Amino acid sequence: MQTVVGIDLGTQSLKVLFYDFSSREVVASESAELDLYQNEDGAAEQQAHWWLNALHEALGKVDPAVKSSAVAVGVSGQQHGFVPMSKSGEVLAPVKLWCDTSTVAECGEIMEAYGSEQSCLEEVGNLILPGYTASKVRWFGKESESLYEQMDCILLPHDYLNYYLTGERSMEAGDASGTGFLDIREREWSPGMLKAIDPNRDLSECLPALQLEPGITGRVRSEIAKRTGLPEGIPVSTGGGDNMMGAIGTGNVSQGKITMSLGTSGTVYAYSDQPIVDPRGEIAAFCSSTGGWLPLMCTMNCTVTTELMRGMLGADIRQFESAVSSAPRGAEGIITLPFFNGERTPNLPRAKACIVGLDSQNTNPENLLRSAMEGATFALRYGVERLGELGVEATEILLTGGGVGSATWRQAVADICGAPVTVLKQNEGASFGAALQALLVLEQGVEQDLPALAEHHLSRNEVLCCEPKNSSVNFYNEAYRDYQLAVGAITPLYT
């Protein structure tokens, strides 16, 4: 048996997956939980060594014989996290994550220094939004001057795991486009944006080599092989951000499909063979990790919404599914605005979650849970619509992420978005995408192309796929308008 390994560094856990590509079977899948530090100022941080501990814990659960079968590794990671490293490889500070909204002021400072928001969009392709890496770099320079001076290299979370495995420092275009300082059209660092972040230092000297196509970033070092049980010297592919690897893992590597991820955050994205720059800046103009582009909308609150509501109401997963399936669509008029972590789309980093429409008749656990699920989905419908307005049309939604386990949620996505929902048998998302990229690296010698590879290794789970119901689509069109009105009503409170 030979396997490829997919590693996915998420916010709540790290997952490892071993895929036997000859039998097309996942032979091992393990995970380890991660802590998260958050405070009321919007900070969201993790220690880089927590990731390494989780990697060892997850791999430690895998049979040694399975680990020894690995012939290549691919790494996926949460986007935007800022890993400042010294020359010796020491991580100089806690890693500020994608959901960190404490650097709002720095976002404005950078865009003002660059010229204007419009200049950012026209020349680089993206606004500098809370959560992106750029504002974290500027914040670090202001808050920790002595440590900032020691910074020799800037990495992203998946880059750091690549560095740990191989000793090589690198970035790839997909994940790098989420920093805010990559010119996404030209796929190269933007000198003007780097200067806007810090006019007194040449930050390009802190940026590693940029890989533009999938390939080998390095090989597993002997000392890491001894610690993990992975074979020494096997190749580690470039990897990428979790959304970029999720695109590969759902077969979204050619035009005509939209992937929707129901994870801690929610994302909606599609492959494009040309840059897609949103004049409003709501759709991120990202590169893919496959040589193309990946226009994407992110919400900062998806399953975090349902998890918080489940926790408050004391409902486990089984009880959650029973509740949302028994509650009427529309939750009898209750609307949840799921801005627990602030929000990126709409750009309301200081926002708080709100529940409106409660009365003495509809206030019950079933409606509250149903409304949480629907609110998170309404937020994602906006991304589907906005992509369509930018010319990114799709005939199906490829659904992935933790929320896929709910039959009611799957149907709600189809009904709210008015599109067929496809779930794959290989519903491992980013970790499976990372494994497929690792397989691509192995098979490039036989001129294997990624669309063909994805088609060969991915198949529909017909039992979980669903079609929109016309009566529900019409109902949710009205409910969605009410949701948008509610968002508009609370916006002045948080701007």
Image: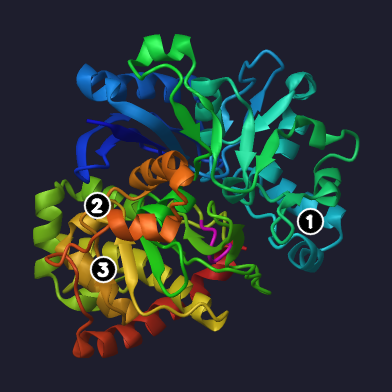
Q: Amino acid at mark 3?
A: Thr
User: Quarter holding the N terminus?
Assistant: top left
Label annotation for residue 179 = none
Q: Earlier in the sequence, mark 3 or mark 1?
A: 1
Decide which of 369, 433 is in the foreground and name it.
433
Question: Residue 210 appears at what percent x and percent y?
Answer: 68, 41
Up/down of 393 relative to 100, above or below = below
Mark 2 falls on what kind of element? loop
Q: Label 2: few (<14), some or many (≥20) within 10 Å?
A: some
Provide the secondary structure element on which disc 1 rests: helix
Residue 15's spot in the image, x, y percent?
32, 34
Residues tagged 2 and 1 counted as in contact (Cβ below 8 A) = no
Residue in the picture at 23% in, 60% down? 459
Q: Is residue 306 visible?
A: no
Find disc 1 in the rendering and name its residue: 111
Residue indicated by mark 2: 426
In the image, is residue 31 part of the stretch drawn in magenta? no
Residue 81: % across, % down: 56, 38
Q: CA distance from mark 3 to mark 1?
A: 39 Å
The residue identified by callout 3 is 422
Which segment did they paint magenta?
343-347
Label 3: state its secondary structure. Answer: strand
444 sits to left or right of 167 = left
Q: Give the mark, 2 or 1, whose residue is nearer the N terminus.
A: 1
- Alpha-carbon span between mark 2 and mark 1: 41 Å
Tell which of 480 and 214 is nearer to you.
214
Count of labels in the image: 3
Q: Depth-wise, is mark 2 or mark 1 nearer the camera?
A: 2
Asked if disc 3 and disc 1 are in contact, CB closer than 8 Å, the reply is no
**Residue found 54% across the figure and 59% down from its top:** 344
